[in-house]
């Protein structure tokens, strides 16, 4: 596992949900009100006008950025009136078909300072076609339940083509099953047709399982829905048949098995609590493991012994689940023996390019560490950074940064992520009082705005555009100068992103 140096810390996943944070300075609305209109009404009208203007500007942006802006305004309740909300949600649903990526992916290997790491962050924005549709449906439920059901029935899962060990990312369609769970639990009207609707929707989800990356999500859905004993008795046999007959590719298998056991255990626990036969679930999962893991596995490590440890861990995990349900054993479901899941074929995964381990990356890593930490490994204080020696070291490092790109052997998109990470890390380290801070910020934003990634890889570009502000949140620095720089960048998309943030901050 590579240690993140230039990339954001693990807490970034939490900050994603809080991206548009509270401003450090207040902006007041003009207090000129038309005759007979009070202050509150005037403020509401002004907000409505600004929202409409932001939405109109968003419509001229790429689909992913348009969806991102409109979702923010909807989720923060700046759009007033159910009719207007429904109209925008319908518009987003139709817009989803034009997104560059049809389905969300996630990395199969834990690597932060790499393309895989940045893709993980970019996909976490949930701006692929399927994710946009599911987000629309979940927002539609409290407004117009029957329309949410209709939209869900229009969703078509993309074909989940088999993957190989050369694929370093796999499918993540958990949001689809989350949307289905919400539809079944809150959107269906209580009438004589509800049971039929539930059986059709969940039955279709079970029959549609074609990848091992789906069955744990379906198991989770069945375990968390408030299903009756009769409903569980209806769905579980079909689920078990699918599980027993499911043939997995090695990449999907390596990504699904680590978390699947827990979901299978929860489903079995739910069945036991409801008085539904659960033996078949554990037996089906055992059969799936034996049939698939013994064929072929991906080795994502340089040391093959770590793959052996994974196999042992999966064996022990199943046996622990089995023992939890049958402490005295069960003659119909035998524990897995040591080595029983060993694969006949081991396929080596390709190497990942770690930005910190390229020739220039090693130099840049050493330099950033020296700027950030003293010789004892302690973080440098503000007083340390005011000393001439540190300022001179910063100038030398910045010259190195500007002379090190492009990095030989890296693709254009790798160089984009790499330089964004370095410039962003410098912004976190350099005090805003330092004269070089403004130069770094200007270069950082200029580099993002002029990069062709904006057209070729929209969600990756948007991720880096968002990170500019996220880094300010991490270091508790004022976002004002960054917002102004984004707004004044001359790039219409950066300006839209910044001004949406400023609008939300002003009207929080």
Image: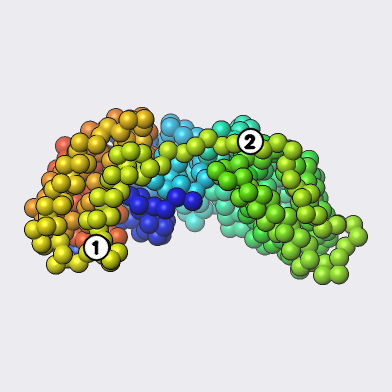
Residue 294 or residue 438, whichever sits in front: 294
Quarter of image, res 91: top left
Residue 244 or residue 85, whichever sits in front: 244
Residue located beneath label 2 in the image: 347
* Mark 2: secondary structure: strand
* Mark 1: secondary structure: loop
**Residue mark closest to the camera, 1 vs 2:** 1
Which quadrant would the C terminus be assigned to in this image? bottom left
In percent of the image, x 88 and y 62: which residue is there?
330
Quarter of image, res 375: bottom left
Horizontal arrangement in the rendering, residue 314 relative to residue 61 (left or right): right
Horizontal arrangement in the rendering, residue 423 relative to residue 130 (left or right): left
x, y percent for residue 252 = 62, 41
Residue 2 or residue 152, whichever sits in front: 2
Horizontal arrangement in the rendering, residue 31 relative to residue 108 (left or right): left
In percent of the image, x 70 and y 36: which residue is there?
345
Q: Residue furthest right?
A: 331
Residue located beneath label 1 in the image: 374
x, y percent for residue 338 = 78, 54
In percent of the image, x 66 and y 59: which residue is there?
262
x, y percent for residue 123 = 45, 43
Which numbered disc, 1 or 2, marks the residue that appears first in the sequence? Answer: 2
Distance from label 1 to label 2 (Cα)? 44 Å
In percent of the image, x 8 and y 53: which residue is there?
435
Residue 177 or residue 53, whichever sits in front: 177
x, y percent for residue 117 = 43, 45
Label ID, residue 61 = none
Kindly tell me whether residue 329 is visible in this rendering.
Answer: yes
Kindly tell me whether residue 250 is visible in this rendering.
Answer: no
Callout 2: few (<14), some (14-19), or many (20+) C-alpha neighbours within 10 Å?
Answer: some
């Amino acid at each position: 596992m590579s240690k993140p140096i230039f990339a954001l810390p693990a807490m970034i996943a939490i900050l994603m949900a809080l991206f548009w944070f509270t401003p450090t300075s207040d902006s007041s609305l003009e207090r000129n009100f038309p005759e007979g209109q009070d202050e509150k009404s005037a403020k509401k009208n002004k907000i409505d006008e600004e929202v409409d203007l932001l939405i109109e500007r968003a419509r001229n942006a790429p689909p992913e950025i348009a969806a991102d802006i409109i979702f923010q305004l909807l989720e923060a309740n700046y759009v007033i009136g159910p009719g207007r909300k429904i109209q925008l949600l319908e518009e987003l649903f139709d817009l989803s078909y034009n997104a560059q990526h049809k389905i969300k992916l996630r990395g199969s290997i834990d690597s932060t300072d790499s393309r895989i790491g940045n893709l993980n962050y970019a996909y976490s924005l949930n701006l692929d076609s399927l994710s946009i549709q599911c987000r629309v449906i979940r927002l539609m439920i409290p407004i117009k339940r029957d329309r949410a059901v209709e939209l869900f029935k229009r969703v078509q899962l993309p074909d989940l083509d088999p993957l190989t060990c050369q694929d370093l990312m796999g499918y993540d369609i958990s949001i689809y099953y989350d949307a289905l769970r919400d539809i079944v639990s809150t959107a269906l009207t209580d009438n004589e047709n509800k049971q039929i609707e539930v059986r059709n929707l969940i039955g279709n989800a079970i029959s549609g399982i074609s990848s091992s990356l789906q069955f744990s999500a379906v198991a989770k859905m069945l375990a968390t829905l408030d299903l009756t004993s009769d409903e569980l008795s209806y769905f579980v046999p079909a689920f078990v048949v699918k599980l027993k007959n499911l043939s997995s590719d090695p990449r999907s298998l390596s990504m699904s098995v680590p978390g699947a056991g827990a979901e299978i255990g929860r489903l079995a626990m739910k069945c036991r609590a409801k008085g539904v036969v659960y033996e078949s679930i554990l037996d089906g999962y055992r059969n799936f493991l034996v049939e698939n893991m013994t064929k072929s596995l991906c080795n994502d490590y340089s040391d093959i012994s770590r793959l052996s440890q994974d196999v042992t861990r999966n064996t022990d995990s199943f046996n622990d689940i089995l023992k939890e349900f049958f402490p005295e054993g069960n003659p119909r479901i035998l524990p897995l023996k040591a080595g029983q899941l060993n694969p006949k074929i081991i396929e080596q995964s390709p190497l990942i390019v770690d930005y910190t381990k390229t020739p220039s990356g090693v130099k840049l890593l050493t330099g950033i560490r020296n700027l950030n930490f003293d010789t004892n490994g302690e973080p440098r204080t503000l007083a340390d950074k005011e000393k001439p020696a540190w300022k001179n070291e910063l100038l030398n490092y910045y010259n190195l940064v500007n002379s090190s790109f492009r990095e030989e052997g890296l693709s254009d998109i790798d160089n984009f992520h790499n330089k964004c990470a370095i410039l962003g890390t410098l912004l976190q380290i350099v005090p805003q009082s330092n004269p070089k801070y403004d130069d770094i910020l200007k270069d950082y934003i200029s580099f993002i705005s002029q990069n062709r990634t904006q057209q070729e890889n929209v969600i990756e570009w948007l991720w880096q555009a968002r990170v500019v502000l996220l880094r300010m949140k991490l270091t508790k620095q004022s976002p004002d100068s960054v917002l102004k720089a984004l707004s004044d960048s001359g790039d219409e998309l950066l300006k839209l992103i910044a001004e949406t943030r400023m609008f939300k901050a002003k009207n929080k």
